[in-house]
Amino acid sequence: VPGLADVLRGPVLEVAPRLLGSVLTHRTDQGAVAVRLTEVEAYDGGQDPGSHAFRGSTRRNQVMFGPAGHAYVYFTYGMHHCMNIVCGSEGRASAVLLRAGEVVEGLDLARVRRTSGPDRDLARGPARLCRALGVDLAHNGLDLSEGPLTLDLATDTPPPEQISTGPRVGLRLAADRPWRFWLTGEPTVSVYRPATTRPRKRTG
DNA sequence: AAACAGATCTACT
DNA sequence: GTAGATCTGTTTT
């Protein structure tokens, strides 16, 4: 039976749907919160204009250029964190963005971390998922086989008819690639939003 | 030292 | 369904 690292070393377009139904757990002094993944997106490093790694390695994205099985966490919009799982062969810089999931453990703690709302929204959206789990930049680069963040692969990979695909959310570039994968009919899947064109700050 | 970019969220209707 | 907030971490000079 292949281990976690063996699976994650595969091509990102195979790894991404394979992660659906897997469970990510974060254990802290506060307790544990676990999320069953229901929606992910594939990013293929230097081959993918939508990837943070497309223009090469920087300090921010260097984790993606490392070995599979580590967490790539980034910060955006001045207030949000999003988490990826690095996959593929080392140096390729491919990763799977965790877009949404169902909280299956630590509901009370997740509710405290998130602003009030229905439980189905606790980890619905990549930043919400991180917030519910208590994941931030301190977790960037962590090996998911060692904790405190651990990934348990679904024992049975979802049958193809339970997996839907579509364009990735919020991207201007490579918006045509249907590299978003989700479990069909899951209420925790985030709402599709096309990229928004925001006004550039005036330069004077 | 300064400018930039932003793989989103919440609130509001 | 949609607008607007948000403001830091990152990159570049």
Image (cartoon, coloured by chain):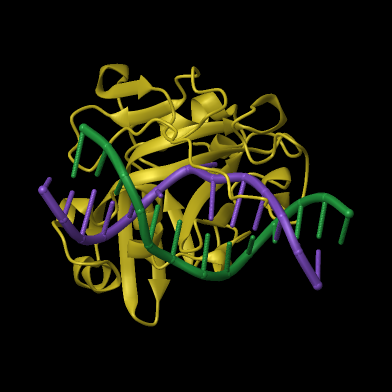
Chain colours: A yellow, B purple, C green
Residue at image position (50%, 66%) is A136
Image quadrant in which you'd find residue C13: bottom right
Q: Position of residue A174 (x, y in %)?
A: 56, 22
| Left or right, A172 with reference to A126 | right
In percent of width and height, residue B5 lies at: 62, 45
**Where A192 sits versus A29, above or below?**
above
Residue at far front of view? A204
Asked if one can make out residue A190 in the rendered structure from this viewpoint, the answer is no
Which quadrant of the figure has residue A117? bottom left
In the rendered structure, the answer to whether residue A131 lies left or right of residue A12 reads: left
Determine whether, in the image, residue A16 is placed left or right of residue A173: left
Residue name at image x 24 percent, y 57 percent: A122
Above or below residue A175? Residue A138 is: below
Q: Is residue A191 visible?
A: yes
Q: Residue A195: x, y in percent? A: 44, 33
Instruction: Name the residue nearer the viewer: A21 or A76.
Output: A76
Left or right of A113 on screen, residue B13: left
Image position of A155 with respect to A136: above or below? above
Total marks in image: 0
Give percent across and percent down for residue A154: 35, 40
Which is more toward the observer, A116 or A194?
A194
Instruction: Using the image as rendered, state which of residue B6 and residue A60 is in the foreground.
Output: B6
* Residue at (29% x, 53% y) in the render: A123
